[in-house]
Image (cartoon, coloured by chain):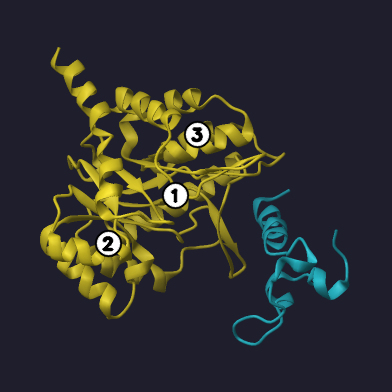
Chain colours: A cyan, B yellow
Amino acid sequence: MKLVQLQRAVARAVMQPLTRNEGMRSVGPRGKSMRRYVGLPLVSEVGAGP
Amino acid sequence: MPANKFNGFTEYGIGLGLRAPHYDHILTRKPVCDWFEIISENFMIGGGRPLQVLDRILEQYKVVQHGVSMYFGSPGRPDREHLQKLKELVIRTGTPWLSDHLCWGSVDGTYTHDLLPMPYTFEAARLTAAKIKEVRDFIGVPVAVENVSSYAEYHVSEMTEWEFLNEVVERADCGILLDVNNIYVSSRNHSFDPLVYINSVPAERIAQIHIAGHSKFEKYILDTHDHPVIDPVWSLYDRAIERVGHTATLLEWDDSIPSFQEVHNEALKANRFLAKKLLKVAV
């Protein structure tokens, strides 16, 4: 795996809330969905989580 | 060895991180302190109280800049606007060297605001070293990279963390800000011998040393900078000084910050190890 591919994967993982009650906002500071930043649906939005 | 090209051939003693709760004490009492380390990003602004305080501090104290967002290991070129602001601050402070972390934290324009550990690969070492050189050439002062504490490792790594550090600093011909607390924290989290790390770094490249306290949890240790330095970390510092000599040393205390005097007293404990080294040299 190339370095940049690994870093993209890790960045997505780091910015993904792990639990439903982690309290991560669904909207970013400029009013856009946080999905825009992480490229993945939030756990709270897909209803998953431990 | 302590004064070297990586710290601008300076002989700095024991410093403290400049923190807002101590501003008034420092400005009114003017305590004796060898030097202060500032977080560059806190002062890369157009004006206001932080810069006013900084200018007054600069009238009386030596200041060294430490950054938290260069992300030498992130893909892509350094942000030119950020570098320009950093250079303006370097001119203002007269910092003899500039430090930031050997880590990454952004990709494709997204900033995680974390100091993420590098995969220890030759590709990463090559790209990181190139970026360090580019920053140094633009800023115009020596650069020292700091080893971070880490909580995860990568399967793709081709070497140990200390081998990676060696590889990067040799390729970039840059200095090291050796954080002995980070070595201790990572050694506990990843089960390696911290003394092997300390003994493996190129002593002649160490520009500065960081010491700090941390928090211990059930399954891991977290680099929180909110406690006194523990004895095992002082032991590692002792060994580092034994190898490197009298090196600029800074205590980081960033949370639950006690009085200036209490923080300074904790930092001055480093003197017993520095004095021991001087005595050995004298004998």
What chain does mark 2 sit on?
B
Relative side of B102 to A42, left or right: left
Q: Are marks 1 and 3 on the same chain?
A: yes
Foreground residue, B104 or B181? B181
Examine the rendered structure and indicate whether residue B111 appears above or below residue B121.
Answer: below
Please, what is the three-letter code of the amino acid marked with disc 1? His
Q: Residue B82's spot in the image, x, y percent?
A: 40, 70
Cα–Cα gap, marks 1 and 2 = 16 Å
Residue B181 shown left or right of residue B13 in the figure: right
* Residue at the image position 50 percent from the left and 45 percent from the top: B148
- Mark 1 is surrounded, within 10 Å at the Cα level, by few (under 14), some (14 to 19) or many (20 or more) other residues, namely many
Mark earlier in primary sequence (3, 2): 2
Q: Using the image, determine if residue B229 lies above or below residue B60.
A: above
Q: Quadrant of the C terminus of chain B?
A: top left
Q: Secondary structure at mark 3?
A: helix
Where is the N terminus of chain B found, in terms of image quarters? top left
Look at mark 1 in the image and give the residue it sits on.
B225
Q: Residue at x 43, y 23 (%)?
A: B199
Q: Quadrant of residue B249?
A: top left
| Chain assignment, label 1 | B
Q: Which tag is nearer the camera, tag 3 or tag 2? A: 2
The furthest residue to the top = B283
Q: Residue furthest bottom?
A: A31
In percent of width and height, residue B60 lies at: 11, 59
What is the chain letter for disc 3? B
Viewer-side residue, A22 vs A10:
A22
Q: Circle 2: is it few (<14), some (14-19), or many (20+) Cα within 10 Å?
A: some
Find residue B259 and report its image quarter. Answer: bottom left
The circle drawn on residue B22 is 2
